[in-house]
Image: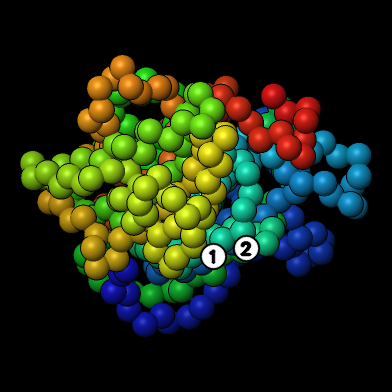
Amino acid sequence: MLNLPRPRATRQVTTFDRESGLKVALIEPGASRTVARIDGSGYLAKLWLTLPGWFWAHWEPDRLVDPAVLKHVVLRIHVDDSEHPQIAAPIADLFGLGLARVRNYASRWVGASSGGFYLTLPMPFRHSLRIDIDNRDPDQRVDLFLNGLYQLADLPPDAPVLHGAFSTGRHQGEDPLTLLEATGPGRYVGTLLSLQGEPRSYLSYLEAPEHIDADGEQIIGTGMEDYFLGGWYFREGPVIGPDHGVILKDNLDSAVSLYRFHDTDAIWFDSALTFRFSNPWDPARLRPFAHSAVAFSYLDVARSVPPVPDRAELRCWYRWHTEDHPSIP
């Protein structure tokens, strides 16, 4: 995805404290904490993390179990001491699980690997990289395990900065769904997207083709499921590929979680890019839907991404998964 130089050295940041022997960073409800910092020049090559709270922890049997904690914990990455982050998203969405329903999948760039979550999109930095965690959950302490393997390297002058822009909300059926507005030079390289229709057994939001405006030139497709390289409302159900996939499809709950990444098919732009889905159907045939997403781009310099809204807005879904957790609204 990027042409990066041979590293001078390989290092890793971790929440493991050699002095205390404690493996985790503890973040109390409502608190924020820097959990990793790298100084120098190079790129973060692999980020892995996990935390309990979304499943029953046998070592702490009376602990609250609420999968929504994955939506309440926000990860922020600041490159080169930027005041505003270049990546900011709930953990659930950053790893493709925006519905807070964990499913195993292992793609080339992101995945949920049997209890752990990973991201391998290279993240170049010239001076520093900092990872902060905001715990917005009102009840749960975050016990965060994190490892970030990075390469120290002399970056070329044109090495870009990875950005991850989060968006979420509820929409009327005819509303365009805008996932990214970026200024360049840069390239759009992929999206993690979760959606849910307000009525049950409703997937017609998938009729919306992508509309990509790159420097005033439009790229238009034939449907949302087509953009994610599926068809017929993902007729055969979940599929996991290296660069695209359907992590979850629940017809009754009107819900899907999807990903697509671009490599040689990245969308390049010199000045500006807008990426949205727009449904051509008569509004009378459409119904409300909700979404949450992270759109990734490489930009020429470190720019700010939209702030993550408050916890109430993060809980955008009409129905939360309650099969194993009947107390969750």
Residue at position x 37%, y 20% in the image: 172
Picture layout, residue 116 above or below residue 253: below
Instruction: Locate residue 316, reporting x and y percent.
Output: 53, 26
Coloration mode = rainbow
- On the question of residue 240 being in view, the answer is yes
Residue type beneath disc 2: Ser
Residue at position x 37%, y 47% in the image: 232
Lower position in the chain sequence, tag 1 or tag 2: 1
Q: Secondary structure at mark 1?
A: strand
From the viewer's perspective, is 49 left or right of 139? left
Residue at position x 8%, y 45% in the image: 217
Residue at position x 90%, y 52% in the image: 59
Q: Can you identify the residue that label 2 sits on?
A: 113
- Work out whether residue 235 or residue 28 is closer to the camera in this orientation and state it: 235
Q: How many marks?
A: 2
Picture layout, residue 246 above or below residue 286: below
Picture layout, residue 267 above or below residue 303: below
**Location of the C terminus (image quadrant):** top right
- Work out whether residue 233 or residue 246 is closer to the camera in this orientation and state it: 233
Instruction: Locate residue 74, reporting x and y percent.
Output: 56, 40
From the viewer's perspective, is 268 left or right of 111? left
* Quarter holding residue 1: bottom left
Residue type beneath disc 1: Ala
Q: Can you identify the residue that label 1 sits on?
A: 106
For label 1, the crowd category at 10 Å Cα-Cα, with few meaning under 14, some 14 to 19 and many 20 or more, is some
Q: Tags 1 and 2 in contact by the CB under 8 Å rule?
A: yes
Instruction: Locate residue 263, reporting x and y percent.
Output: 29, 66
Picture layout, residue 198 above or below residue 88: above
